[in-house]
Amino acid sequence: MKALKHTLIASGLLFVALSLQNAWGYTYTCYSRTGTPNPIIANFGTYTITVPSENVPGQTFMSAATWSQSVSSHIRCDEPTTGNRYRYFSADSTLTPTTNDGHQWYYINEYLDSTVALNIMGAAHYVPFRNVRGGMANDAATNTQVNGGGSGKIDLRFKKAVMGSSSFENVHVADFYVTKSTTATSPEPVAQIFLSGTVVVPQNCVINAGTVISLDLGEMYSLDFISVGEKPRNVNAKSFNVPVSCNYGASLANLTLRVDGTPAASVPDALETTNPDVGVKITASDGMTLRPADTSSAIPITLDMVDSDTYTTNVSLQAYPVSTTGLPPAEGTFTALAILRIDFA
């Protein structure tokens, strides 16, 4: 019995010792002192391509653009208050990954993919990366800061040829993390990087001299909206012309025109309007429907030469309202918005 009694007492003491050790443990994770990740907003300006033959799908531009800002993120880390420890930096992206050729490429817009590299300790590291060792510090206090994400570069790749320019604004390209151990994983970034910029190419076309085309579809009766996807009774399509002017570089390409906009939920080949029971269809002169936001739904453009660097045409289109629900729409004015885009075929 005495041996059994001693065994039980020893077991109890061991449990207490382990509990105290866990209570004094550290996660070695770091977070923003403000409670939210530090937003780093960068703009690399304009990247201009001067060689028309480079404006093709698959063309890659390494180190196409850089950014550099003097920014710091104030951090606090869960570590002992004594002694300095290495900082370890990691980064990932919320962008959609596309291809990987040793570097991860991400979706920027319908024309561009991009890699993202952040400068850490004087070297560029492509996102995603993990546990890049930095300098030593003690970050248990609330007055320490790190420089990360303030400078970097991107590579660009054309998914399809660009007409004129392609821009993106405040795209959330990367999240930047700090830990004090290679086995730790911080639950939230200390900084987030947002990037803007414009890519300009030699080929350029302008629609309607860059101004808005307004089209009045007229008046119609609510009770004439009967069949989903069809015009109301006694309503005819409205014809309109789209003036297009291109430079010489663009004239050498096979050009197409398409409609971009928000499709109506129940009739996806019509544009959404401010009236949920009404959509607007846009068609070519031959009756082909130009489906909004469908890059394959396009018509070819043929240009006429005006002078050595000016080529023009007028594209004839039609527009008409359709029912999206089969229900009589509420009386009143409705509007729809579409963007006409010219692409290389």
Image (cartoon, rainbow, N blue to C red):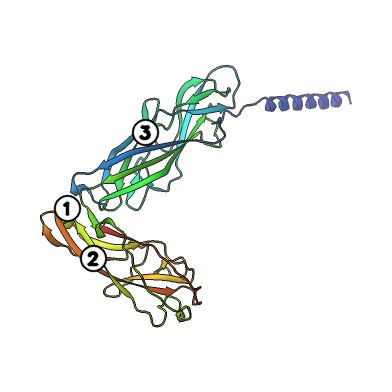
Instruction: Give the residue drawn at x 72%, y 25%.
Output: 20
Label at residue 300: 2
Q: Amino acid at mark 3?
A: Gly
Separation of marks 1 and 2 at Cα, in angstroms: 17 Å
Instruction: Give how far across and how far down residue 41 sits, in percent.
Output: 42, 37
Q: Using the image as rendered, state which of residue 187 and residue 196 is in the foreground.
A: 196
Task: Determine which quarter of the picture holds residue 293.
Answer: bottom left
Task: Determine which quarter of the picture holds residue 134.
Answer: top left
Taking the image as shown, residue 5 lies to the left or right of residue 313, namely right
Image vertical order of residue 247 relative to residue 281, above or below: above
Instruction: Give the residue drawn at x 20%, y 48%.
Output: 202
Instruction: Give how far across and how far down residue 159 sits, in percent.
Output: 30, 51
Q: Is residue 344 visible?
A: no
The disc, 1 or 2, on the residue closer to the chain's N-terminal end is 1
- Residue on which disc 3 sits: 152
Image vertical order of residue 191 relative to residue 304, above or below: above
Separation of marks 1 and 3 at Cα, in angstroms: 33 Å
Separation of marks 2 and 3 at Cα, in angstroms: 40 Å
Instruction: Give how far across and how far down residue 60 sits, in percent.
Output: 27, 44
Q: Is residue 142 visible?
A: yes
Taking the image as shown, residue 32 lies to the left or right of residue 168, namely right
Instruction: Give how far across and how far down residue 118 sits, in percent.
Output: 39, 33
Dot 2 and dot 3 residues touching (CB under 8 Å): no
The disc, 1 or 3, on the residue closer to the chain's N-terminal end is 3
**Nearer the camera: disc 1 or disc 3:** 1
Judged from the image, the secondary structure of the residue bearing numbered disc 3 is strand
Instruction: State which quarter of the image contains the N terminus.
Output: top right
